[in-house]
Image (spheres, helix red, strand yellow):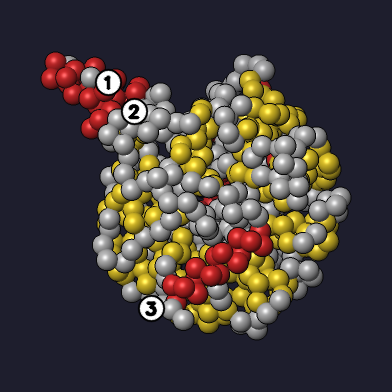
Amino acid sequence: MSRSLVFGMFFLIAAAQSGAAGDWTQWRGNDRNGVAADSPELLSSIPAGGLKPVWVSEKIGSGSNEGGWGSPVVASFPGDPTAPQRVYLFTHKRIQIRDVPKKQFPWLPPEKRVGMSDAEYAEYEAKRRDEDQAIAKSYIFRETIYCLNAADGSTLWKNETDSFYTRFPQSGSPTVSDGRLYILGAGGHVRCIDALTGKDVWNNRLPVEFRDEFWQSSFLVVDDLAIFLAGRLYAVRTKDGSIAWEGDAKTSRGTHTSPVLWQHDGHDFVIVNVNGNQTACFEATTGREVWRVDSEAGLATPVIAGDLLITYGNSRKKGVRCFRMTPAAAAHLWTYNGCQDKGSSPVVVNGHVFVQGEKRIACVNLETGDEEWRTTVDLGQPQYTSLVAADNKVFYALEGLLGFAAIPDEFTPVINAKIDADGLLASEASLRTLHGIDELEKQDQGAAEKLYQAKIGRQGPVVCATPALADGRLYVRMKNAIACYDLRK
């Protein structure tokens, strides 16, 4: 049996276990691998006049003040044929209630720390956090879970609650399982909501010291447990949110990466990046650690392909790494050093790993680690946003939508489009013509640049968010809304 057929069978079996094939029930899809299994045939090019969105939601803010960078998920309810398929998004925003004092200790990028010793910078950071915490009293904070009708984008319900200050907005993605939605709120609050009605089921606070921490890990639901990172690894019972087990505070430390499920010989294991440079395997039911490896993995979510583990680091030296797993240990097979990213996660399609980082996209042979091809993409500052795949195509939504064939022969784009202020998905050349930018540029370059930024440059997907891809529809978190595009052929 060919390796590609084995991987194809694995994805279909996993999809049947974790959710309906036309859903995207959690961060990175039903199987947390970025692949929409059993997808319909998708477009191989954008129509000449561009692709209009099927719908655009009500205004939903994003970024550091207006809602964070969480990604949408999509779920249906087979037990209730009258319930439409739904799109969910979690946001965390701040609302000013009084005058904000001027900052004395702004965040310093690395280039502005020159001349400061480690001790001096640590002291500066302590003062900065103290100041930020004091400034936070000028705001109130609110968490909102949006539930939209996947057919037309109308809002079915919102779950809004007062929240807490964090240094960066909470930006986890919801997980929907058995009609319930799970999310990690600010301040270490573990929340469960009825996915049909939007009513709270339970809301428990973890027994952790909290100051301004932000944990972006998304839940992995395994049977009656919801497993996630919040400073350390936790498993809570889905029935009431009580802690079933917790990892060691020193050896299971972690913040933003999300755990994945590995099933082997009828046993469930949780694979997760911990301690900044390691990946560990735990029994799902007990939390007992069974092995760990020095993966040098960053904030990316690990990828499971059969018994192979793919990790991704935030430097080229750390690179993409592949391990073969057994219940007793994991053996390193290869490392690819062609790119790096702070938190983007790869996808595995047809026996190849597709990975982006540093304005590069590469195709790597899963069996050998050999580079099949690598290309440079014309993007500003790509980071964190992850690849998704369906119908033997890989998609990257940043500043627009890039789609390419999941083949090892060469980089073969099928879609390379921007999104304008009206949500139209089209080639940049088409959009420039549509908005008269090229003609204006002949007369006034400054005015043309302003028009370009207003109509095209400042539009498009939110940086760091990743779209959901369900039943041939792409659900993109834009800067001020969610937009749905029908990519079916």
In three-dimensional space, the C-alpha distance between marks 1 and 3, rounded to whole angstroms, equals 48 Å
Q: Secondary structure at mark 3?
A: loop
Task: Point out which mark residue 41 bears.
Answer: none
User: Which marked residue is nearer to the observer: mark 1 or mark 3?
Assistant: 1
**Residue sitting nearer the eye, 63 or 105:** 63
The quarter in which the C terminus is drawn is top left
| Residue 424 % position (x, y) | 38, 29
Q: Which residue is mark 3?
A: 368
Q: Residue at x 27, y 55 (%)?
A: 412
In three-dimensional space, the C-alpha distance between marks 1 and 2, rounded to whole angstroms, equals 9 Å
Q: Earlier in the sequence, mark 1 or mark 2?
A: 1
Task: Point out which mark residue 456 bears.
Answer: 2
**Residue 237 against residue 194 in the figure, above or below:** below
Q: Is residue 73 visible?
A: yes
Amino acid on which disc 2 is placed: Ile
User: Which marked residue is nearer to the observer: mark 1 or mark 2?
Assistant: 1
- Image quarter for residue 437? top left
Q: Residue at x 51, y 27 (%)?
A: 56
Q: Residue at x 48, y 31 (%)?
A: 54
In three-dimensional space, the C-alpha distance between marks 2 and 3, rounded to whole angstroms, equals 41 Å
Q: Which residue is mark 1?
A: 435
| Residue 325 % position (x, y) | 57, 79
| Label 1 CA crowd tier, 10 Å (few <14, some 14–19, many 20+) | some
Amino acid on which disc 3 is placed: Thr
